[in-house]
Amino acid sequence: MDRPEGGEALSNREKAAAVSELSGRYPLFDLLECAELARSTYYYALSHPKGPTRPELRDAAAEIFSRTANGCGHRQIAMCLRAEQGAVVADKTVLKMMREMGLRCRIRRETGCRKYSSYKGKVGDTFENVIGRDFEAAAPWLKMGTDVTEFKQPWGKAYFAPVYDFGSKEIVAWSTSRRPDMAQQTRLLDSLMAKKPKGAKPVLHSDMGWQYQHAKWVKRLKDAGFVQSMSRKGNCLDNGATEQVFGHLKDEFFRGRTWPDFDSFKADLDAYVVHWNTRRRQAKLKGLTPEEFRNQSLAA
């Protein structure tokens, strides 16, 4: 009764519950001896049933969980509770509380959200892999990544193209379109250039997709002071930081959902990106949101 096979040692309350369950069939003295449980401890455990974990935080935890359609993990909830409620609470305590409340994130699996492959061979300029899988950046606007992912819906397909800042973890610019064409990339660059701080010369990493080799893309980045970097052909790990964003988006926003039309899908995706930037806290940013980290960095 001390330790189930492959599990952790039972608590006194769990032992007392097991003894109580068996007490009608076996002598109580023998059960307590087997459980190595004192009689006083047994009766105390029965008269003081275990209460819910941190009941004062449960409403706030449920609200944080509901901010995205498919919920979020215990670390995200713990960071929000500490930052927004001033709570002193450990990650493991939040996990325990969530289990008691029945709040569980769904397990990641394949969905209708997938990476769009835009590789068409060498159709323009290609560049060295300057990033080299080193996605760490001490400040915003030093290293960034971009890519395109595809969503399938009953009404057709949609394509999401973001620019992701490796330093602030912010989705700095994005474009959602029915077609993965150069018009989408032009809108993406328009948004990116409008936000670029004066004097910034970041590395912008991508795969070897046709759009990133396009003369208009290459010239516009060069004129703005960007340094282009490209993954090796057929190696998605070279752009792992941006791919990870797509994975979180799939889990928290997209999986298991359908939209009636493109416009409603786009509106909800825009809202999720705003949530990512302004409310979704990052462990690597010490519990700050991307927006908070960027503001602190630029003010320093």
Image (cartoon, rainbow, N blue to C red):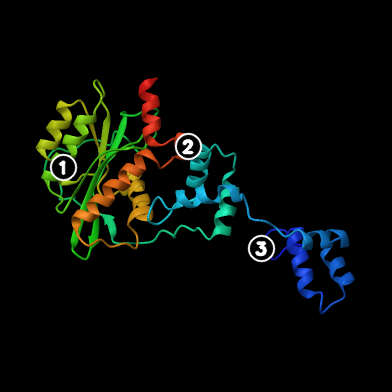
Looking at the rendered structure, the kind of residue marked 1 is Gln
Q: Residue at x 81, y 59 (%)?
A: 44
Percent across and percent down for residue 6 are 66, 63
Looking at the rendered structure, the kind of residue marked 2 is Gly
Report the disc number at residue 193: none
Q: Which residue is mark 2?
A: 287
Tell me the distance, in whole angstroms, between the alpha carbons under discs 3 and 1. 53 Å
Report the disc number at residue 6: 3
Percent across and percent down for residue 11 are 74, 58
**Mark 2 neighbour density, 10 Å: few (under 14) some (14–19) many (20 or more):** some
Image quadrant where one finds the C terminus: top left
Q: Nearer the viewer, residue 5 or 175?
A: 175
Percent across and percent down for residue 296 are 40, 25
Left or right: where 4 falls relative to 254: right
- The answer to whether residue 1 is visible is no
Report the disc number at residue 185: 1
Quarter location, residue 228: top left
Image quadrant where one finds the N terminus: bottom right
Quarter location, residue 98: bottom right
Cβ atoms at labels 2 and 3 below 8 Å apart: no
Q: Residue furthest bottom?
A: 25
Helix, strand or loop at mark 2: loop
Where 146 falls versus 71 (above or below)?
Answer: above
Left or right: where 204 falls relative to 215: right
Where 27 falls versus 126 (above or below)?
Answer: below
Helix, strand or loop at mark 1: helix
- Tell which tag, 1 or 2, sits nearer the viewer: 2
Of callouts 3 and 1, the N-terminal one: 3
Quarter location, residue 211: top left
- The answer to whether residue 209 is visible is yes
**Mark 3 neighbour density, 10 Å: few (under 14) some (14–19) many (20 or more):** few
